Image (cartoon, coloured by chain):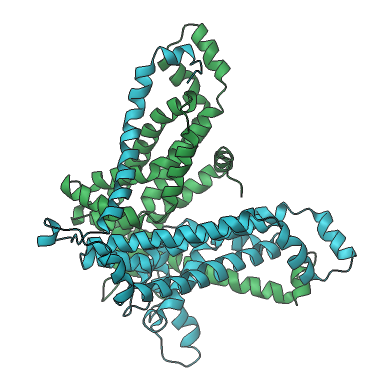
Chain colours: A green, B cyan
Amino acid sequence: MAREVMDQDRPSRLTALALAFLALIWVSPFFWLMTNAIDPAATGQLEVPQSIGIDNFVQALSGSAGRQFVNSMLIAAGTATLTVVVAISAAYPLSRMRIPGRNAFLWALVLLRMLPATGVIVPMYFAAQAAGLLNMMGIVLALTILNLPFTLLLLKNFFDTVPIELEEAAYVEGASLWTILIKIVLPLSKAGIAVVWFFSFTGAWNEFLLPLIFSRTEAGFPMSIGLYSAFGRQGSIDYGFLAAFSIIYAAPAVGVYFLLRRNMNTGFAGVGVKG
Amino acid sequence: MKYQLHPWLASNLWVLVALAIPAIFLIGALLYFTGWALAFSFTDLELVGRKAVNWSWVGFDNYARLFTRRGFLESLWTTTIFSFFSAIVGQSVLGFLLAATLRTQRSVLRGVIEATIMLGWLVPDIVAAFLWSATTAQTGLINNLIITPLGFEPVNFINEFALPVVIIANIWKGTAWSYLLFSAALDSVSREVVEAAKVDGATAFQRVWRVILPIIRPHIATNMLFITIWTFTYFPLIYALTGGGPGRQTEVLAIFLYKQSFMVGKLGYGSAISVAMLVIVGVLSLFYLRLLKEPK
């Protein structure tokens, strides 16, 4: 059998069967999700929807569910924007000025962040509590701090690829630092900045642990916490509603990936990570 | 620094420094928090009550407690089982097999598998947890489609087989990363080398074991490095699915840390746990990095 598995030109019937089985495992939860989401009378069973409608989706975007969607948007967009703005401002000087040991420093920071985030959560919680930041603002700040090392490294590498001659020419023509930044550097690294923004966006959108610890009031729950508290509950579960809610919650994260698939590759080529 | 700064930068030096200040401040905060976590682990700081204010230094008590009290070692074992089966056996091996079998196929099946494992990877952790919670529930898919038609009583999988459910859910969620990495790795193996081995009479197994695997060895090490770190410290999916239960069957280190810090309230002990996790992950990383560098 091993021979047939690897004999690449004619896959055996057994391989095809194994693949079909795997496909079934991966597909069925999604299929179940779809059928339940479009059926206003869904019961959590896998069955042909008795009726088809968008009631579940409407429900998943109104009331407290709607507010959670807005909260998630605020947290994700806030984190992404703050991260990118702070990182751009520091990455440009970092890229253009020869500060000794800057690369080693950046890599050390990135390695530090590779280690479990759970480690810094306890002091972060304490600091946020002392500063009265156990809310969405605190989540945005905490995520920005956690995102920053990697974002800085990425953006510095993008700026490194902008030819210095262009800036020189602009300077000779009489352009100021701001003009150079806004008219030359930023447009030329647009793709990279977009990747970083969306990357931070999805990261914050999916985040579960920080909101779990930082969100004190139900009005401040993002979708991750909303979904968690809804299905973890004992008793009757409104499967149709939760299915629609899940689809709405998953859509931005999935959409962003396909939107940026091409940019993503160039983005990571810029970091020079082998792998 | 004898390096000549470009004129438009030199004349705006203070602006540039000012621009960098927010980032310096936030990076400083990150370093400060990391140092703080280390310092906390030598105190008896608690979340609420008297010791939230009047804490004191306790030396290595928290670290001693890791080994003398019940909890840490059990969680370490659970984490090891979870990581080994879901990351190394599951995601890595399955990802490789899928990459190896699918790459020469141009079928609908390939499209379906690729699209859905990518979807599994991209959906938020809590959505994956909801899907698997619903799938394995007493009225869920597995019971409806397999167990009940076979004439058995419906099984509550999360209660009966918590760890396997969590492991399978994580394989389902994370295989895409290994699949993508190994697909790229296999593309870098030149066809001639494999053909030459075939001509020389190597069996399919020998071709994989003796030719392909040694070539993609750096990719294997990279993959192991990343997925081990991620899985070892993974929290959301497991916590949302089982909350660490039933009992403490699925209480991996990340959940143990969370519960000790924020439910029991022992922040000092929690910090010691996270420092221990850091050390374990660090040692594992060094091991994989050696594997990555070592000449074949």
Where residue B141 sits in the image (x, y, percent)? 45, 77
Where residue B21 sits in the image (x, y, percent)? 32, 29
Residue B135 location, quadrant: bottom left
Q: Which of these two is toward me, A138 or A117? A: A117
Q: Residue furthest bottom?
A: B151
- Whether B235 is drawn above or below A172: the answer is below
Where residue B125 sits in the image (x, y, percent)? 41, 60
Residue B287 location, quadrant: bottom right
Where residue B231 sits in the image (x, y, percent)? 46, 63
Residue A209 shown left or right of residue A197 in the figure:
left
Residue A233 location, quadrant: bottom left
Q: Residue furthest left?
A: B50
- Whether A151 is drawn above or below B190: the answer is above
Residue at horizontal 33 percent and vertical 73 percent from the top: B67
Residue A204 shown left or right of residue A63 in the figure:
right
Question: Is there any visible trace of residue A48 in the rendered image?
Answer: no
Residue at horizontal 45 percent and vertical 38 percent from the top: A105
Q: Which of these two is toward me, B277 or A265? A: B277
Q: How many marks?
A: 0
Question: Is there any visible trace of residue A146 in the rendered image?
Answer: yes
- Whether B15 is drawn above or below A75: the answer is above
Residue at horizontal 30 percent and vertical 44 percent from the top: B32
In the picture, the quarter occupied by the C terminus of chain B is: bottom right
Residue at horizontal 48 percent and vertical 27 percent from the top: A95
